[in-house]
Image: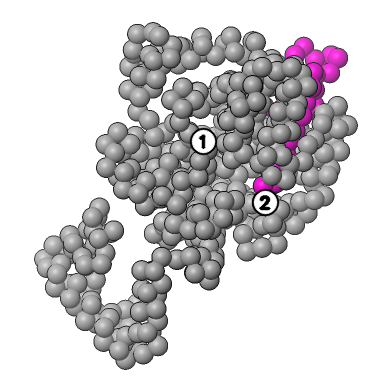
Amino acid sequence: MQIKSPEFKENSRIALKDVNLQKALGNLKAGFPVKRANAVDRMPEFEDLRNEARDLKNHILENLDVYLEQFESKVVENGGHVHWARTSDDACKTILDICQQVGAKTVTKGKSMVSEEVNLNEYLEKNGVQPIETDLGEYILQLRNDHPSHIIAPAIHLNLEDVSEAFHEHHHRPKSDDPAVLMQEAREMLRKQFVSADVGITGANFCVAETGSTIIVTNEGNGDLTQTLPKTHIVITSIEKVVPTLEDMTLFQRLLARSATGQEFTVYNTLSTGPRRAEDQDGPENFHVVLVDNGRSEMIGSELQDMLRCIRCSACMNHCPVYGAVGGHSYGWVYPGPMGSVLTPQMIGIENAGLLPNASTFCGKCESVCPVKIPLPKLMRHWRDNEFEKHLSPKAVRWGISGWGFFAKRPALYRWVSRSSAWFMRTMAGKKGRINKLPLAGGWTDWRDMPAPEGKTFMDQWKQGKR
């Protein structure tokens, strides 16, 4: 996937004017946030579980090497293989080598954001191995030569007519606007791929150190078919996904589905523990786990370590007003929304992703809904500081901060300017109580009204006893 994060502003302008995209994003706003809220209301202990999950994740990260080595030992004990991939290239080369060793020409794939991160599909295709996406959303995107715009709903930027058009073009069947018909079409097209695939590749939501197991949490049966029918099953996942025990895994499962889709539990929760045993009726003959670092180990012990608590539920982007306005593709790389605004600069460099941590209202909603309480606004501020220190901020931003600094060092002048500005904005708003157009704030007022201030500064109101 090409890096287009430096084009965030232009991507956003296009997205805001894209009628079809705005229609699709409207479905997001009316869906996941409401379902999550309802699911949380039905679970009185939800906040206690969030605290427990945060503390457990912190413990895991402080002992990550121990649990990863325990996981590797158990996988080997079960007859599988573990491969350590420091970079994207290492991960891709490792998976290609496994495919070539078994003479694979086609592989079926379950949904995996890490495989998107390392550009696995493109790498395999260049080397004569054809990957077939089997998650419905990912399959639709592959037909359209498109990329995911969301972690759990990769094709959320599309509408029904977009899917119908893609299926008509590639399946050569009559167009349909019936989701059930389109679903059946996908089943029929993918069934032969499941049966004939030489290798199956999945991601992993969690890796259990206690048993050497990996688990995929899905709402479709494609993941099970992908990992049980081919002779070789490859799991590609990142190093922070390890958890100590099966019981610990269930804690995160209770939070994951509720935070992601508002479900009590996802439909499929499938554990893989090594290759097929003699008494097993099905399963792969070979089992491989590729553990991807890709800059994550550098986050351990740094200000960004909290980001490694992420369990990829997408709650932050589901509730983010910026993501809800411009969609995932505007962010220009694999991970969108607030979590992407923190993770992307680490992986592709702040010089390529500086616009992302600045694309936030800092309303704090992302942190308030995160199931493991990641302080996302704080981490975005870290990247803003980093960008400023490296003199990467746009000149207008630097001049603006310098101008603010000039006034801030002169309290009397600062108060006078503040009072004058508040009075001016209140006068502009008139009886409406809001401002349609405001000089130097077109980025705000082009798309929404600016609420009018009280007409008095905070300090004036405080002196008057307002609390």
Mark 2, residues whose alpha carbon is within 10 Å: few (<14), some, or many (≥20)? some
Q: Position of residue 236 (x, y in %)?
A: 68, 34
Residue 375 image label: none
Classify 467 as above or below 6: below
Residue type for callout 1: Ile
Please name whichever residue, 63 or 236, is drawn nearer the observer in this view of the structure. Answer: 236
Residue type for callout 2: Arg
Q: In the displayed structure, does residue 438 sit left or right of residue 39?
A: left
Residue drawn at 66 percent across, 57 percent down: 299
Q: Position of residue 413 (x, y in %)?
A: 30, 89
Q: In the displayed structure, does residue 464 sit left or right of residue 157?
A: left
Residue drawn at 67 percent across, 47 percent down: 294
Residue 296 image label: 2
Residue on which disc 1 sits: 152
Residue drawn at 57 percent across, 11 percent down: 191
In this picture, which residue range is highlighted in magenta?
A: 269-294
Inspect the magenta stretch and tell me whether residue 451 lies in it: no
Please name whichever residue, 54 or 410, is drawn nearer the observer in this view of the structure. Answer: 410
Secondary element at tag 1: loop
Marks 2 and 1, how far apart at CA: 21 Å
Image-quadrant location for residue 445: bottom left
Q: In the displayed structure, does residue 448 sit left or right of residue 345?
A: left
Q: Earlier in the sequence, mark 2 or mark 1?
A: 1
Q: Is residue 272 visible?
A: no
Q: Position of residue 278 (x, y in %)?
A: 86, 14
Classify 362 as above or below 189: below
Residue drawn at 85 percent across, 28 percent down: 78
If the image is split into quadrants, where does the C terminus sit? bottom left
Inspect the magenta stretch and tell me whether residue 290 lies in it: yes
Classify 233 as above or below 26: above
Secondary element at tag 2: loop
